[in-house]
Image (cartoon, helix red, strand yellow):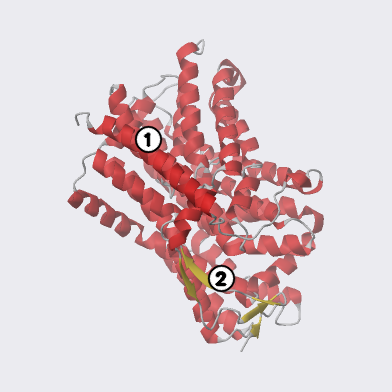
C-alpha cells in the first residue's frame, strides 16, 4: 500500500524542523566536540534518522529499512567504488616508487619559495586531490614544503588554503556525483554550475597564497607566475567541468597549470630568489631524473586522464551502459508518494560505465607497463580496501541517512523551514555547505547531508535548485581548511602536533572570507545573472542509438591505441 511522505508531521513547522535537525546536530557535536570516529558517528546518526522516520514521520519500518539499504548501496557503488580505485591507483604509484619520482621532479623545478608554493601547494595539491583526495593532498604537499625548508606553520597553512580550489571535484568528482545521487539532478548540470563559480576563486587563490607568504612586494615580483598558474587552472577547470565530466577538472587543471608554469619558468625567472627569514634546514631528498623516467612515473595518471575523459563522453557512456543491471526495489518502488507523485526506486548497477571501473582499467594497464606482479597487484588492492574500510563505512552510513531523511520527509521539513531566509538564501547556502564540511571534513558528506535540503528550499523560494546545490559544494570547499581532520593532517605532516589551535587561527579568517566570496557570487548569479544557471534536468542515460554506439566504439579504440603506443614506449625502458 502506498505511503504519503510526511512533511511537518507535528503540525508546527518550527517544532518539526527542530526535531528533524537532531541527527545533524548530533553529528556536529559528535565530530566537533566529542571527537567520535567518523564511522561510529555516521552509524549513530543513521539510527537516529531511522527512529525519527518511524516514530515521528510514520514511515513503515519495511520502507525505512529498504530506503537505508538503497542509500548504503548508493554509497558503496558508484561512490565508494571510485574512492577505492582512485586510492588504489595512487597506492600503486607509491609502492612501485613512481610517486617518488613525480614528487622529486616537481620539487626541483625552482628554488623560490613563492613558486614552490604555486607548484606544490596549489597545482600538485590539486592533482593529488583529484587523484586520491581524503587528506592525501595536504599530508604530502605540506610534508614536501616543510622538507624543502618552509616554516612548518606556513607549510601546513599554505597547503590547507591552497586545497580550497580543487575540493568540489576531489577524488575523481565524488562530491558532485554524490550531489546528483541525493537530489536526482544530472550531475553534469551541477558540475557546470560549480564550474561557473569556483574558477573565480581559482584565479584569485595563487595571488592570495603568495601575498600571505611574501606580502605585496613579493607577490608583484612574481605576478607573471601567479597569472599563468591561476588562469591556466581556472580555464581548464571551467572547460572540463562544463564540457567534459565532473571526474576530470582537478587532474586536468592541475596538470595544465604545472605544465604552463614550467614552460613560463623556461623563459622567465623572478628578479630575486625569495626565502623565509631564518628557515629551518631542508630535509627533503631530491634527485635528477631523465625525461623517460619522468614519463614512466606520470604514465598511470596520463592513462587515468585519457580513460576518465572517455567515460565522461555520451557516446562512450551509451555503449558501456548497455550492460547495466537494474534492480527494482519491490516494496519501495512506486510506494512512496512525495510531492503528489510516487517515487521510482530502481538501483542501476552500471558496473562498466562507472568512473571507478575506468580507474581500475587504468590501474591494470599501469601495472602491466610498470611490470607489477599479480601478487603485488592483489596485495596493494587488498591493503587499499583495508585502509579504506572505515571511510567506506562512513560514506555508506551518511548516504543511508541522506536517503532516509529525504524520503521520510525530514529533509523537506527542514527545507521548508529554511525558506524563512528569503532572498539571502543563495548567500546562506554557501555557509550551509561550509558548515557541512567543517563538521564532517568532507565535501562529499556535506553534499549528502545538505544538497536535498538546498534543492527543496530553492524550489520553495522560486529559485533554480541547481544554483544552491552547486553552491553547497562550492561553499563547502572553504570549510575544508579548518575541519578537524584537515588540521590534524596538516600538523601531523609538518611536526606541529599539539599546535592545532595555531594552525586553526592561521586559516580561519581565510576560510570565512572565501565562503563569503562564493556566497556573493551565488547571490549575483541568482538575481542578476540567472541565465548562467543550467536547467535542473533529471539524471538520464545517454541515448543508445546505433550512431552513438559506433562513435563510442571509435573513441575507445582510438584511446586504447594511444595508450598502447605510450605503454610500449614506457615498457621498453629499463626499471
**Label 1 – label 2 distance at C-alpha:** 42 Å
Precedes in sequence: disc 1 or disc 2: 2
Residue 241 visible here: yes
Tag 2 secondary structure:
helix
Mark 1 or 2: the one toward you:
1
* Residue that carries the numbered disc 1 in the rendered image: 562
Say which of 575 and 219 sits in front: 575
Residue at image mark 2: 403
Residue drawn at 53 percent across, 66 percent down: 27
In the image: residue 28, left or right of residue 516: left
The residue that appears at 49% across and 72% down in the rendered structure is 70
Q: Is residue 351 above or below residue 481?
A: below
Quarter holding the C terminus is: top left
Residue 446 shown left or right of residue 392 in the figure: right
State left or right for residue 427 relative to residue 487.
Answer: right
What residue lies at 59% left-to-right and 34% top-to-bottom?
234
User: What secondary structure is found at the residue carrying circle 1?
Assistant: helix
Q: Position of residue 21 (x, y in %)?
A: 63, 70
* Residue 503: assigned label: none
**Could you say which is closer to the camera, residue 284 or residue 84?**
84
Amino acid at each position: 500500500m502506498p505511503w504519503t511522505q510526511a512533511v511537518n508531521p507535528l503540525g508546527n513547522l518550527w517544532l518539526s524542523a527542530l526535531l528533524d535537525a537532531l541527527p545533524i546536530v548530533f553529528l556536529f557535536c559528535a565530530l566537533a566536540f566529542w571527537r567520535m570516529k567518523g564511522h561510529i558517528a555516521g552509524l549513530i546518526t543513521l539510527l537516529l534518522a531511522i527512529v525519527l522516520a518511524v516514530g515521528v514521520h510514520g514511515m513503515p519500518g519495511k520502507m525505512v529499512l529498504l530506503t537505508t539499504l538503497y542509500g548504503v548501496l548508493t554509497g558503496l557503488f558508484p561512490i565508494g567504488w571510485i574512492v577505492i580505485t582512485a586510492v588504489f591507483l595512487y597506492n600503486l604509484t607509491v609502492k612501485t616508487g613512481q610517486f617518488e619520482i613525480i614528487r622529486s621532479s616537481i620539487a626541483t623545478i625552482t628554488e623560490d619559495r613563492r613558486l614552490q608554493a604555486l607548484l606544490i601547494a596549489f597545482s600538485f595539491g590539486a592533482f593529488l586531490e583529484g587523484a586520491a583526495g581524503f587528506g592525501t593532498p595536504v599530508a604530502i604537499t605540506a610534508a614536501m614544503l616543510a622538507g624543502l625548508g618552509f616554516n612548518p606553520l606556513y607549510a601546513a597553512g599554505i597547503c590547507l588554503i591552497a586545497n580550497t580550489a580543487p575540493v568540489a571535484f576531489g577524488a575523481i568528482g565524488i562530491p558532485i556525483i554524490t550531489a546528483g545521487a541525493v537530489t536526482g539532478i544530472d550531475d553534469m548540470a551541477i558540475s557546470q554550475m560549480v564550474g561557473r563559480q569556483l574558477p573565480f576563486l581559482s584565479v584569485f587563490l595563487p595571488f592570495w597564497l603568495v601575498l600571505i607568504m611574501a606580502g605585496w612586494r613579493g607577490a608583484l615580483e612574481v605576478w607573471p607566475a601567479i597569472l599563468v598558474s591561476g588562469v591556466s587552472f581556472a580555464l581548464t577547470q571551467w572547460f572540463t567541468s562544463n564540457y567534459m565530466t565532473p571526474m576530470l577538472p582537478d587532474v586536468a587543471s592541475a596538470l595544465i597549470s604545472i605544465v604552463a608554469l614550467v614552460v613560463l619558468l623556461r623563459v622567465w625567472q623572478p628578479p630575486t630568489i625569495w626565502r623565509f627569514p631564518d628557515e629551518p634546514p631542508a630535509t627533503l631528498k631530491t634527485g635528477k631524473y631523465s625525461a623517460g623516467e619522468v614519463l614512466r612515473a606520470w604514465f598511470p595518471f596520463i592513462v587515468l586522464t585519457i580513460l576518465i575523459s572517455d567515460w565522461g563522453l555520451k557516446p562512450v557512456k551509451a555503449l558501456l551502459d548497455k550492460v547495466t543491471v537494474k534492480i527494482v526495489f519491490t516494496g519501495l518502488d512506486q510506494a512512496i508518494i512525495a510531492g503528489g507523485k510516487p517515487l521510482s526506486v530502481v538501483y542501476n548497477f552500471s558496473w562498466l560505465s562507472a568512473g571507478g571501473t575506468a580507474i581500475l582499467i587504468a590501474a591494470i594497464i599501469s601495472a602491466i607497463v610498470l611490470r607489477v606482479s599479480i601478487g603485488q597487484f592483489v596485495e596493494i588492492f587488498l591493503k587499499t580496501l583495508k585502509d579504506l574500510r572505515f571511510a567506506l563505512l562512513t560514506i555508506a552510513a551518511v548516504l543511508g541517512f541522506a536517503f532516509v531523511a529525504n524520503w521520510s520527509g525530514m529533509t523537506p521539513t527542514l527545507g521548508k523551514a529554511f525558506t524563512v531566509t528569503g532572498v539571502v538564501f543563495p548567500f546562506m547556502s554557501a555557509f550551509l555547505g561550509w558548515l557541512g564540511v567543517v563538521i564532517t571534513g568532507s565535501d562529499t558528506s556535506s553534499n549528502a547531508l545538505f544538497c536535498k535540503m538546498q534543492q527543496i528550499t530553492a524550489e520553495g523560494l522560486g529559485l533554480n535548485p541547481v544554483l544552491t546545490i552547486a553552491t553547497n559544494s562550492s561553499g563547502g570547499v572553504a570549510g575544508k581548511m579548518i575541519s578537524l581532520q584537515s588540521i590534524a593532517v596538516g600538523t601531523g605532516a609538518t611536526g606541529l602536533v599539539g599546535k592545532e589551535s595555531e594552525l586553526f587561527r592561521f586559516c580561519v579568517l581565510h576560510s570565512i572570507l572565501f565562503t563569503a566570496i562564493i556566497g556573493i557570487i551565488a547571490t549575483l548569479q541568482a538575481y542578476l545573472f540567472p541565465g548562467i544557471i543550467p536547467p535542473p534536468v533529471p539524471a538520464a542515460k545517454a541515448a543508445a542509438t546505433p550512431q552513438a554506439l559506433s562513435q563510442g566504439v571509435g573513441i575507445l579504440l582510438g584511446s586504447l591505441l594511444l595508450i598502447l603506443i605510450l605503454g610500449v614506449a614506457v615498457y621498453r625502458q629499463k626499471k
